[in-house]
Image: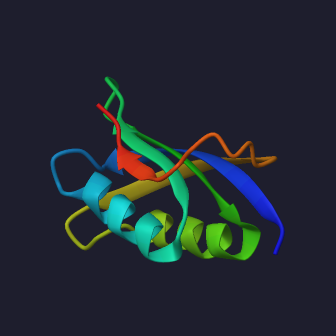
Amino acid sequence: MESARIHAQVRGVVQGVGFRYFVLRTARAAGLTGFVKNLSDGDVEIMAEGPREKLQRFARDVSEGPSCALVQDVQITWAECTGEFASFEVSF
């Protein structure tokens, strides 16, 4: 399977509603590596690496989010996998 990287910025009601931990559980269940973190402007940033097919499914899941969040927009940039992450974590 071809590996890749996505960088996503998620806008909407995505802070204070468990969104980062939804992303964490979803990424770990898919075997992805990277991080998720809150940004000072209210958005959430995600960097994830893994098999392209799993990243595509992950991106769809993130675009929907958990039921308590309201995802209004997701900007995703695809890039080559660097292998720099050992696991998927919440970054502060």
In this rendering, is residue 37 above or below 41?
below
- The image quarter containing residue 15 is top left
Residue appearing at x 60%, y 76% in the figure? 57
On the image, the x and y values in percent for residue 25 come to: 34, 68
Residue furthest top as drawn:
40
Write down the quadrant of residue 84 in the picture: top right
Residue occupying image coordinates x 39% and y 58%: 71
**At 55% across and 69% down in the image, what residue appears?**
58
Residue 5, compared with residue 50, is above or below; it is above
x, y (%) of residue 79?
79, 45
Residue 67 lies in quadrant: bottom left
Query: In the visual, does 82 lie left or right of 61?
Result: right
Of 18 and 35, the residue lying toward us: 35
Single out the residue that lies furthest toward the front: 86
| Number of marks in the rendered image | 0
Instruction: Give percent across and percent down for residue 32.
Output: 55, 63
Q: Colour scheme used in the picture? A: rainbow
Taking the image as shown, residue 87 lies to the left or right of residue 80, namely: left
Residue 3 in picture, x, y percent from top left:
77, 62
Q: In which quarter of the image is the C terminus?
A: top left
Query: Vertically, is 3 above or below 1?
Result: above
Location of the N terminus (image quadrant): bottom right
Q: Residue at x 54, y 52 (%)?
A: 74
Q: Nearer the viewer, residue 90 or 9?
A: 90
Depth check: give the residue in front, 75 or 80. Answer: 80
Give 91 or 14, whichever is nearer the viewer. Answer: 91
